Image (cartoon, rainbow, N blue to C red):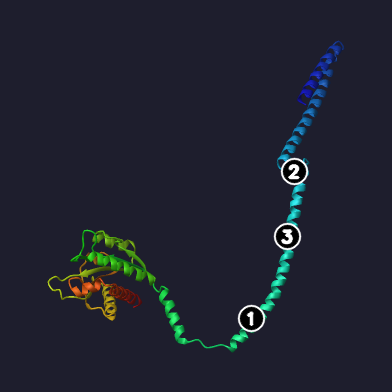
Protein backbone atom coordinates (compact mmCIF):
# COMPACT_ATOMS: atom_id res chain seq x y z
CA UNK A 1 0.00 0.00 0.00
CA UNK A 2 2.84 2.47 0.61
CA UNK A 3 3.99 1.89 -3.02
CA UNK A 4 0.57 2.94 -4.37
CA UNK A 5 0.48 6.14 -2.36
CA UNK A 6 3.99 7.14 -3.48
CA UNK A 7 3.12 6.33 -7.09
CA UNK A 8 -0.04 8.35 -6.91
CA UNK A 9 1.88 11.34 -5.55
CA UNK A 10 4.44 10.93 -8.33
CA UNK A 11 1.70 10.97 -10.97
CA UNK A 12 0.17 14.00 -9.35
CA UNK A 13 3.47 15.85 -9.55
CA UNK A 14 3.81 14.96 -13.29
CA UNK A 15 0.25 16.13 -13.80
CA UNK A 16 1.06 19.39 -12.07
CA UNK A 17 4.18 19.90 -14.19
CA UNK A 18 2.22 19.19 -17.37
CA UNK A 19 -0.48 21.65 -16.42
CA UNK A 20 2.19 24.14 -15.48
CA UNK A 21 3.75 23.98 -18.96
CA UNK A 22 0.34 23.93 -20.63
CA UNK A 23 -1.00 26.97 -18.85
CA UNK A 24 2.22 28.89 -18.45
CA UNK A 25 1.55 31.00 -21.45
CA UNK A 26 -1.90 31.85 -20.22
CA UNK A 27 -0.38 32.96 -16.88
CA UNK A 28 -2.74 30.93 -14.72
CA UNK A 29 -0.15 28.33 -13.66
CA UNK A 30 -0.24 29.45 -10.00
CA UNK A 31 -3.89 28.61 -9.59
CA UNK A 32 -3.51 25.20 -11.31
CA UNK A 33 -0.47 24.35 -9.18
CA UNK A 34 -2.28 25.10 -5.96
CA UNK A 35 -5.36 23.11 -6.98
CA UNK A 36 -3.36 20.01 -7.98
CA UNK A 37 -1.27 20.15 -4.78
CA UNK A 38 -4.43 20.21 -2.66
CA UNK A 39 -5.82 17.24 -4.59
CA UNK A 40 -2.58 15.29 -4.14
CA UNK A 41 -2.53 15.97 -0.38
CA UNK A 42 -6.17 14.86 0.02
CA UNK A 43 -5.51 11.63 -1.86
CA UNK A 44 -2.33 10.94 0.15
CA UNK A 45 -4.17 11.60 3.44
CA UNK A 46 -6.97 9.20 2.52
CA UNK A 47 -4.49 6.53 1.53
CA UNK A 48 -2.60 7.00 4.80
CA UNK A 49 -5.79 6.66 6.88
CA UNK A 50 -6.78 3.54 4.96
CA UNK A 51 -3.37 1.97 5.59
CA UNK A 52 -3.55 2.92 9.25
CA UNK A 53 -6.91 1.16 9.62
CA UNK A 54 -5.59 -1.97 7.92
CA UNK A 55 -2.58 -2.10 10.24
CA UNK A 56 -4.87 -1.72 13.28
CA UNK A 57 -7.12 -4.56 12.05
CA UNK A 58 -4.06 -6.76 11.51
CA UNK A 59 -2.89 -6.16 15.09
CA UNK A 60 -6.31 -7.05 16.47
CA UNK A 61 -6.42 -10.22 14.39
CA UNK A 62 -3.02 -11.35 15.70
CA UNK A 63 -4.03 -10.49 19.25
CA UNK A 64 -7.26 -12.49 19.00
CA UNK A 65 -5.36 -15.43 17.56
CA UNK A 66 -3.01 -15.39 20.56
CA UNK A 67 -5.93 -15.46 23.02
CA UNK A 68 -7.75 -18.14 21.03
CA UNK A 69 -10.73 -16.00 20.02
CA UNK A 70 -12.34 -15.42 16.67
CA UNK A 71 -11.24 -12.40 14.64
CA UNK A 72 -14.09 -10.14 15.43
CA UNK A 73 -14.29 -6.84 17.32
CA UNK A 74 -17.01 -8.36 19.47
CA UNK A 75 -15.12 -11.65 20.08
CA UNK A 76 -13.88 -10.58 23.49
CA UNK A 77 -17.30 -9.30 24.50
CA UNK A 78 -18.86 -12.62 23.54
CA UNK A 79 -16.29 -14.48 25.64
CA UNK A 80 -16.94 -12.26 28.67
CA UNK A 81 -20.68 -12.75 28.27
CA UNK A 82 -20.20 -16.53 28.15
CA UNK A 83 -18.05 -16.41 31.30
CA UNK A 84 -20.67 -14.36 33.16
CA UNK A 85 -23.36 -16.79 32.07
CA UNK A 86 -21.35 -19.74 33.40
CA UNK A 87 -20.79 -17.99 36.76
CA UNK A 88 -24.50 -17.21 37.09
CA UNK A 89 -25.38 -20.82 36.32
CA UNK A 90 -22.91 -22.08 38.95
CA UNK A 91 -24.33 -19.70 41.58
CA UNK A 92 -27.86 -20.90 40.85
CA UNK A 93 -26.80 -24.54 41.14
CA UNK A 94 -25.05 -23.96 44.50
CA UNK A 95 -28.05 -22.03 45.80
CA UNK A 96 -30.39 -24.91 44.94
CA UNK A 97 -28.04 -27.45 46.55
CA UNK A 98 -27.74 -25.30 49.68
CA UNK A 99 -31.51 -25.04 49.95
CA UNK A 100 -31.93 -28.80 49.62
CA UNK A 101 -29.17 -29.49 52.17
CA UNK A 102 -30.65 -26.99 54.62
CA UNK A 103 -34.05 -28.64 54.40
CA UNK A 104 -32.49 -32.04 55.08
CA UNK A 105 -30.53 -30.73 58.10
CA UNK A 106 -33.64 -29.03 59.46
CA UNK A 107 -35.58 -32.29 59.13
CA UNK A 108 -32.81 -34.31 60.79
CA UNK A 109 -32.48 -31.80 63.65
CA UNK A 110 -36.09 -32.45 64.58
CA UNK A 111 -35.38 -36.16 64.68
CA UNK A 112 -32.20 -35.62 66.70
CA UNK A 113 -33.93 -33.42 69.25
CA UNK A 114 -36.60 -36.05 69.78
CA UNK A 115 -33.96 -38.78 70.16
CA UNK A 116 -31.90 -36.66 72.59
CA UNK A 117 -35.02 -35.98 74.65
CA UNK A 118 -35.62 -39.73 74.91
CA UNK A 119 -32.00 -40.32 75.94
CA UNK A 120 -32.13 -37.58 78.58
CA UNK A 121 -35.34 -38.95 80.02
CA UNK A 122 -33.81 -42.43 80.09
CA UNK A 123 -30.61 -41.14 81.75
CA UNK A 124 -32.54 -39.15 84.34
CA UNK A 125 -34.17 -42.33 85.56
CA UNK A 126 -30.73 -43.98 85.86
CA UNK A 127 -28.92 -40.92 87.39
CA UNK A 128 -26.57 -41.59 90.30
CA UNK A 129 -24.93 -38.90 92.41
CA UNK A 130 -21.14 -38.66 91.84
CA UNK A 131 -18.78 -39.56 94.63
CA UNK A 132 -17.60 -36.26 96.20
CA UNK A 133 -14.33 -37.81 97.34
CA UNK A 134 -13.30 -38.88 93.82
CA UNK A 135 -14.28 -35.44 92.47
CA UNK A 136 -12.03 -33.69 94.96
CA UNK A 137 -9.16 -36.02 94.06
CA UNK A 138 -9.54 -35.21 90.36
CA UNK A 139 -9.54 -31.44 91.07
CA UNK A 140 -6.43 -31.73 93.22
CA UNK A 141 -4.61 -33.64 90.48
CA UNK A 142 -5.47 -30.99 87.90
CA UNK A 143 -4.47 -28.09 90.17
CA UNK A 144 -1.13 -29.78 90.83
CA UNK A 145 -0.34 -29.72 87.13
CA UNK A 146 -1.50 -26.16 86.36
CA UNK A 147 1.17 -23.53 87.26
CA UNK A 148 0.07 -21.31 90.13
CA UNK A 149 2.91 -18.78 90.28
CA UNK A 150 4.75 -16.32 88.06
CA UNK A 151 7.93 -14.32 88.33
CA UNK A 152 11.67 -14.74 87.69
CA UNK A 153 13.89 -16.71 90.06
CA UNK A 154 17.67 -16.71 89.56
CA UNK A 155 19.44 -19.91 90.66
CA UNK A 156 23.16 -19.87 91.31
CA UNK A 157 25.09 -23.15 91.44
CA UNK A 158 28.04 -22.48 93.73
CA UNK A 159 31.67 -22.81 92.60
CA UNK A 160 32.40 -24.50 89.24
CA UNK A 161 35.28 -25.04 86.84
CA UNK A 162 38.67 -24.77 88.57
CA UNK A 163 36.88 -23.95 91.84
CA UNK A 164 35.56 -27.31 93.08
CA UNK A 165 34.37 -26.08 96.48
CA UNK A 166 34.39 -28.70 99.19
CA UNK A 167 36.00 -32.00 98.13
CA UNK A 168 35.42 -35.27 99.95
CA UNK A 169 37.14 -38.18 98.21
CA UNK A 170 35.88 -38.03 94.62
CA UNK A 171 32.79 -35.96 95.43
CA UNK A 172 32.91 -32.26 94.53
CA UNK A 173 30.64 -29.59 95.91
CA UNK A 174 30.44 -27.89 92.49
CA UNK A 175 28.80 -31.02 91.00
CA UNK A 176 26.27 -31.44 93.82
CA UNK A 177 25.22 -27.80 93.60
CA UNK A 178 24.87 -27.98 89.79
CA UNK A 179 22.79 -31.18 89.93
CA UNK A 180 20.46 -29.81 92.62
CA UNK A 181 20.07 -26.51 90.74
CA UNK A 182 18.89 -28.48 87.71
CA UNK A 183 16.33 -30.36 89.86
CA UNK A 184 15.15 -27.15 91.54
CA UNK A 185 14.82 -25.43 88.16
CA UNK A 186 12.52 -28.21 86.93
CA UNK A 187 10.40 -28.01 90.09
CA UNK A 188 10.03 -24.22 89.95
CA UNK A 189 9.19 -24.19 86.24
CA UNK A 190 6.50 -26.80 86.90
CA UNK A 191 4.98 -24.31 89.35
CA UNK A 192 4.95 -21.52 86.76
CA UNK A 193 8.16 -19.61 87.54
CA UNK A 194 10.70 -18.48 84.96
CA UNK A 195 14.19 -19.59 85.98
CA UNK A 196 17.53 -18.00 85.07
CA UNK A 197 20.83 -19.79 85.80
CA UNK A 198 24.15 -18.09 86.49
CA UNK A 199 25.94 -21.13 85.05
CA UNK A 200 24.64 -24.12 83.11
CA UNK A 201 27.78 -26.26 82.97
CA UNK A 202 31.00 -26.94 84.86
CA UNK A 203 32.65 -23.56 84.46
CA UNK A 204 33.91 -20.89 86.80
CA UNK A 205 31.92 -17.67 86.88
CA UNK A 206 33.17 -14.66 88.84
CA UNK A 207 31.02 -13.72 91.82
CA UNK A 208 30.47 -10.21 90.48
CA UNK A 209 29.38 -11.69 87.14
CA UNK A 210 26.82 -13.90 88.90
CA UNK A 211 25.26 -10.85 90.56
CA UNK A 212 25.37 -9.00 87.22
CA UNK A 213 23.48 -11.86 85.50
CA UNK A 214 20.80 -11.75 88.19
CA UNK A 215 20.41 -7.97 87.95
CA UNK A 216 20.24 -7.99 84.15
CA UNK A 217 17.56 -10.68 84.29
CA UNK A 218 15.57 -8.44 86.70
CA UNK A 219 14.93 -11.45 88.90
CA UNK A 220 12.42 -11.36 91.73
CA UNK A 221 14.42 -13.77 93.93
CA UNK A 222 18.02 -14.99 94.01
CA UNK A 223 19.00 -18.36 95.49
CA UNK A 224 22.61 -19.57 95.65
CA UNK A 225 23.08 -23.29 96.45
CA UNK A 226 26.15 -24.59 98.30
CA UNK A 227 27.28 -27.37 100.61
CA UNK A 228 29.06 -26.78 103.91
CA UNK A 229 32.11 -28.43 105.48
CA UNK A 230 33.52 -28.79 109.00
CA UNK A 231 36.68 -30.85 108.64
CA UNK A 232 37.55 -30.35 112.32
CA UNK A 233 34.26 -31.93 113.46
CA UNK A 234 32.72 -34.57 111.13
CA UNK A 235 29.69 -34.85 113.39
CA UNK A 236 28.41 -31.38 112.46
CA UNK A 237 25.48 -31.53 110.04
CA UNK A 238 22.37 -29.60 109.10
CA UNK A 239 20.65 -27.29 106.62
CA UNK A 240 21.41 -23.53 106.83
CA UNK A 241 20.25 -20.28 105.16
CA UNK A 242 22.07 -16.95 104.92
CA UNK A 243 20.86 -13.47 104.04
CA UNK A 244 22.48 -10.00 104.02
CA UNK A 245 21.08 -6.95 105.88
CA UNK A 246 17.56 -7.27 104.54
CA UNK A 247 14.26 -7.97 106.23
CA UNK A 248 13.02 -9.51 102.99
CA UNK A 249 16.09 -11.74 102.80
CA UNK A 250 15.62 -12.77 106.42
CA UNK A 251 11.96 -13.61 105.74
CA UNK A 252 12.83 -15.64 102.64
CA UNK A 253 15.55 -17.57 104.50
CA UNK A 254 13.17 -18.28 107.38
CA UNK A 255 10.45 -19.56 105.03
CA UNK A 256 12.91 -21.92 103.34
CA UNK A 257 14.17 -23.11 106.71
CA UNK A 258 10.61 -23.75 107.97
CA UNK A 259 9.74 -25.72 104.82
CA UNK A 260 12.90 -27.84 105.23
CA UNK A 261 12.09 -28.56 108.85
CA UNK A 262 8.51 -29.50 107.88
CA UNK A 263 9.98 -32.01 105.39
CA UNK A 264 11.95 -33.68 108.23
CA UNK A 265 15.26 -32.29 107.05
CA UNK A 266 17.80 -31.58 109.80
CA UNK A 267 18.18 -27.81 110.10
CA UNK A 268 20.55 -25.52 111.97
CA UNK A 269 19.75 -21.79 111.83
CA UNK A 270 19.16 -18.66 109.77
CA UNK A 271 22.16 -16.35 109.80
CA UNK A 272 23.33 -13.10 108.24
CA UNK A 273 26.28 -13.61 105.90
CA UNK A 274 28.47 -11.01 104.19
CA UNK A 275 28.65 -12.82 100.84
CA UNK A 276 29.35 -10.94 97.60
CA UNK A 277 26.47 -12.50 95.66
CA UNK A 278 24.10 -11.36 98.41
CA UNK A 279 25.56 -7.84 98.66
CA UNK A 280 25.58 -7.05 94.94
CA UNK A 281 22.19 -8.43 93.86
CA UNK A 282 19.28 -5.98 93.65
CA UNK A 283 16.56 -8.47 94.56
CA UNK A 284 15.75 -10.50 97.68
CA UNK A 285 18.60 -13.01 97.93
CA UNK A 286 19.62 -15.98 100.07
CA UNK A 287 22.48 -18.44 100.15
CA UNK A 288 21.54 -22.00 101.09
CA UNK A 289 23.95 -24.49 102.63
CA UNK A 290 22.07 -27.69 101.76
CA UNK A 291 24.12 -29.94 104.01
CA UNK A 292 27.57 -30.68 105.44
CA UNK A 293 29.70 -32.81 103.15
CA UNK A 294 32.23 -33.65 105.84
CA UNK A 295 29.51 -35.50 107.74
CA UNK A 296 29.43 -39.01 106.21
CA UNK A 297 25.72 -39.55 106.88
CA UNK A 298 24.70 -36.21 105.39
CA UNK A 299 26.99 -36.66 102.38
CA UNK A 300 25.29 -39.99 101.72
CA UNK A 301 21.90 -38.21 101.90
CA UNK A 302 23.04 -35.47 99.49
CA UNK A 303 23.90 -38.17 96.95
CA UNK A 304 20.60 -40.03 97.40
CA UNK A 305 17.98 -39.39 94.68
CA UNK A 306 14.97 -39.64 97.03
CA UNK A 307 16.50 -37.25 99.56
CA UNK A 308 17.33 -34.81 96.76
CA UNK A 309 13.68 -34.78 95.69
CA UNK A 310 12.64 -34.03 99.27
CA UNK A 311 15.26 -31.29 99.53
CA UNK A 312 14.27 -29.63 96.25
CA UNK A 313 10.54 -29.74 97.06
CA UNK A 314 11.19 -28.18 100.48
CA UNK A 315 13.18 -25.30 98.99
CA UNK A 316 10.47 -24.71 96.36
CA UNK A 317 7.80 -24.76 99.07
CA UNK A 318 9.76 -22.19 101.06
CA UNK A 319 10.03 -19.86 98.05
CA UNK A 320 6.29 -20.16 97.38
CA UNK A 321 5.49 -19.56 101.06
CA UNK A 322 7.51 -16.33 100.96
CA UNK A 323 5.63 -15.17 97.86
CA UNK A 324 2.26 -16.06 99.40
CA UNK A 325 3.02 -14.19 102.65
Q: Secondary structure at mark 1?
A: helix
Does 100 sit left or right of 213 as displayed? right
> Marks 1 and 3, how far apart in space?
36 Å
Instruction: Give the quadrant of residue 21.
Output: top right
Mark 1 or mark 3: which comes first in sequence?
Answer: 3
Using the image, determine if residue 52 lies above or below residue 292. above
Dot in front, 1 or 3: 1
Using the image, determine if residue 27 lies above or below residue 271. above
Residue 103 drawn at (x, y percent):
72, 71
Q: State which quarter of the image contains the N terminus.
A: top right
Residue at (74%, 52%) from the top-left corner? Answer: 83
- 302, 83: nearer the viewer: 302
Total numbered badges shown on the rendered structure: 3
Q: Secondary structure at mark 3?
A: helix
Q: Residues within 10 Å of mark 3 (few under 14, many from 20)?
A: few
Q: Residues within 10 Å of mark 1 (few under 14, many from 20)?
A: few
Q: Is residue 220 visible?
A: no
Amino acid sequence: MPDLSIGHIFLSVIYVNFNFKFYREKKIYKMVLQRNLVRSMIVAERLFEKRKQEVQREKERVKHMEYGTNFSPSGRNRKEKNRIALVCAAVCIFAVLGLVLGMQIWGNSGKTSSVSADVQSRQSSEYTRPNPVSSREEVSEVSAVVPQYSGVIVLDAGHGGEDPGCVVGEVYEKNISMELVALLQKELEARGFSVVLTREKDEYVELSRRAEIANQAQGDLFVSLHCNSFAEDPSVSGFECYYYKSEEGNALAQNIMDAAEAASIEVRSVQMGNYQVLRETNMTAVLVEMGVMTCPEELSSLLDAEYRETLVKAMADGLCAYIDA
